[in-house]
């Protein structure tokens, strides 16, 4: 779900003792208008599950994974995309609205270079710089101009209007943003908390330019807020701020971008459900926002942290933020997570992890993703997930 977005796919930035089945990682537009189906009761799982998938070959091995609310998607080296989990609004992109524990191919998409999963929609950046999205469109989160109305969704990829030069992007609960060549930012979808960054607090069916930011080099899209790192190292944020996730010292939500206090040397940024973290140029990690589940990575519960605090975490190669947990990859066999663990999204202990805890048994990890209540990794060309198994989010045979 929420994760960082930064230029190029050299992903320098975006889980513990997990009973991970020891991850012996040998590690492999239909438009509808009508009422949505209601979700079933959740079924938690205690360890990673591998979605049903073919044995990977050089072309179809997986290289990237993204996790949303109750669904996930993964990109193959060829550029094809597979998704699984909840499909109420067509967020799996295969032309249907049936949930799936097995991976299903996204229709007509063979040239993806980057993926993001939002609350109940998904998007991909194509080699050309165009962006396509599929799933729920009732808040305009597909950006094609046909949404922002009740009963709007697409079960197949549809192009975000007027966007052909994206170099990175991210998705939140019901909105998305893209970083364009030249450092400008556009957002579309739900804007009730100001997260679209332009034109008032409402839904936008088409991309809107974000004012007040310039020469952006990294973009972090959270649940209902956004933060951007400018070339100078300054961080600008906008959107919901009830937990201090904008880092401006207050808790008032904002449509217009405002600078994070005391942070002028940021390199890249990630945003979770209601928290934000920035990697500084000297390697330090600074976080702010909601910390009640330990997602800020500092000892003790923090209800609201309105300005950045240094966590003591350094040396990570990649970092991602989920609903209320954060994970970092330090090497192919060193992955650490902290924050909420009530659904086993970190380990089987189901207790919050206020400071980084190493995930045992992982090796060969090339990508990580943190969803609303689950976590995934790519290793050996395959995808492994653990956490809340509701609606098939983890793949087949979830353990309760």
Image (cartoon, grey):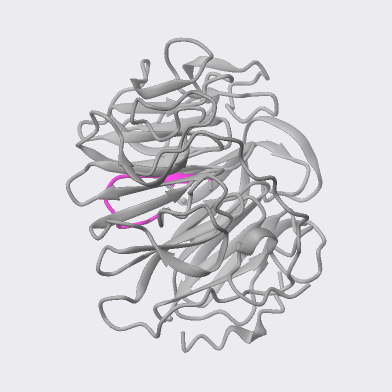
Name above or below for residue 163 compared with residue 258: below
Instruction: Report how many numbered discs are placed on residues in the image.
Output: 0
Residue 59's spot in the image, x, y percent?
A: 25, 76
User: Does residue 202 show up?
Assistant: yes
Name above or below for residue 107 compared with residue 151: below
Highlighted magenta segment, given as a residue range: 2-12
Residue 134's spot in the image, x, y percent?
A: 41, 44
User: Does residue 235 show up?
Assistant: no
Residue 7's spot in the image, x, y percent?
A: 29, 45
Seen in the image, is 323 located left or right of residue 146? right
Identify the main secondary structure in magenta.
loop
The residue depicted at 29 percent of the width and 47 percent of the height is: 125
The residue depicted at 78 percent of the width and 42 percent of the height is: 292
Q: Nearer the viewer, residue 326 or 32?
A: 32
Seen in the image, is 47 located left or right of residue 141? right
- Asked whether residue 5 is drawn in magenta, I would say yes
- Asked whether residue 128 is drawn in magenta, I would say no
The residue depicted at 66 percent of the width and 27 percent of the height is: 244
Residue 239, quarter of picture: top right
């Amino acid at each position: 779900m929420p994760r960082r977005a930064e230029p190029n796919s050299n992903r320098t930035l975006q889980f513990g003792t997990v009973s991970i089945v020891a991850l012996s990682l040998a590690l492999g537009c239909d438009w509808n208008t009508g009422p949505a189906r209601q979700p079933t009761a959740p079924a938690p799982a205690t360890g990673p599950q591998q979605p049903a998938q073919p044995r990977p070959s050089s072309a179809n091995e997986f290289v990237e994974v993204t996790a949303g609310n109750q669904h996930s998607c993964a990109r193959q080296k060829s550029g094809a995309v597979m998704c699984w989990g909840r499909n109420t609004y067509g967020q799996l992109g295969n032309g249907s609205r049936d949930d799936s524990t097995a991976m299903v191919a996204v229709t007509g998409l063979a040239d993806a270079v980057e993926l993001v999963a939002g609350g109940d929609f998904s998007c991909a950046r194509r080699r050309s710089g165009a962006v396509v999205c599929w799933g729920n469109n009732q808040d305009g989160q597909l950006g094609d101009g046909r949404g922002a109305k009740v009963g709007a969704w697409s079960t197949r990829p549809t192009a975000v209007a007027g966007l052909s030069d994206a170099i990175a992007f991210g998705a939140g609960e019901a909105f998305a943003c893209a970083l364009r060549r030249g450092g400008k930012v556009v957002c579309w979808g739900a804007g009730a908390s100001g997260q679209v960054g332009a034109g008032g607090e409402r839904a936008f069916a088409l991309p809107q330019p974000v004012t007040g930011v310039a020469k952006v080099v990294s973009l972090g899209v959270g649940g209902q807020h956004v933060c951007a790192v400018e070339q100078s190292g300054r961080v600008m944020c906008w959107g919901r701020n009830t937990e201090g996730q904008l880092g401006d010292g207050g808790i008032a939500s904002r449509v217009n971008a405002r600078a994070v206090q005391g942070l002028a040397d940021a390199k890249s940024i990630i945003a979770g459900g209601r928290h934000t973290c920035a990697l500084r140029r000297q390697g330090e990690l600074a976080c702010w926002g909601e910390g009640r589940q330990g997602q800020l990575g500092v000892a003790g519960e923090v209800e609201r942290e309105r300005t950045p605090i240094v966590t003591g975490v350094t040396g990570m190669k990649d970092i991602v933020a989920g609903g209320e947990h954060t994970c970092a990859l330090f090497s192919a066999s060193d992955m650490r997570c902290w924050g909420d663990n009530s659904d086993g999204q970190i380990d089987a202990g189901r207790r919050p992890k206020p400071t980084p805890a190493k995930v045992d048994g992982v090796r060969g990890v090339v990508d990580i993703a943190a969803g609303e209540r689950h976590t995934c990794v790519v290793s050996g060309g395959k995808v492994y997930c653990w956490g809340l198994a509701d609606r098939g989010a983890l793949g087949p045979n979830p353990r309760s």
